[in-house]
Amino acid sequence: MVLGLEAQAGSTSLIQALLRHGYDLDVEGDRLRIRPADRVDDTLAELLTQHELLPIVLRLVAMRRLARVAPKAVVYASPEARGGPGRCFSCGDPLEHPTAYGRCGPCDVAADLFYSRSVIEESAGVS
Ligand SMILES: [Zn+2]
């Protein structure tokens, strides 16, 4: 077990655990950046490679930024996203079904994390 997580923990649980344990997650270019890097041991590195965290963290970072600079009633990841059938209203990526409405998978997880009050406060250093 790493960070108190079971081996089959999902991406949401992993990100929440990382933030709860004081890790800072961000995106640098097209790579996930995790700090402090010296606290990423082999076991955690292995766990990070098993999960596709980059698309989620990318959206979470964008949602937090946009919520500050251009807030809307519903959190979103891209100002250019228009939504509509087959398109994620948050980031604009195609949805699995061409007539579906809503958020894509990574935006769904990122929005859950965004609205998870404790995660936001803890990662912002608010107690
Ligand atoms: Zn999306």
Image (tube, rainbow, N blue to C red):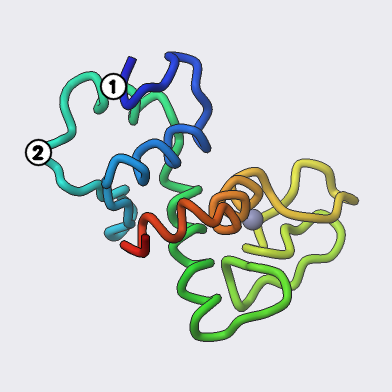
Left or right: 98 as drawn, with respect to 72 = right
Label 1 is placed on what type of residue?
Glu
Horizontal side of 91 relative to 18 (left or right) equals: right
Residue under label 2, please give it: 38
Question: On the image, which quarter does residue 115 sit in?
Answer: bottom right
> Which residue is painted at 43% across and 60% down in the image?
121
Q: Residue furthest left?
A: 38
- Residue at 85% over, 49% down: 98
Mark 2 neighbour class, 10 Å CA radius: few under 14, some 14 to 19, many 20 or more: few
Total marks shown come to 2
Q: Taking 102 as reference, is 9 above or below it?
A: above
Taking the image as shown, residue 70 lies to the left or right of residue 32, namely right
In the rendered structure, find residue 30 and report the number of the disc placed on it: none
Q: Residue furthest right?
A: 99
Q: Nearer the viewer, mark 1 or mark 2?
A: 2
Q: Decide which of tag 1 and tag 2 comes sooner along the chain.
A: 2
Residue underneath mark 1: 46
Residue at 62 percent of width and 50 percent of height: 112
The x and y percentages for residue 18 are 34, 39
- Front residue of 45/31: it is 45
In this view, the residue farthest toward the bottom is 69
x and y, in percent, of residue 107 in the image:
62, 53
Q: Quadrant of the C terminus?
A: bottom left
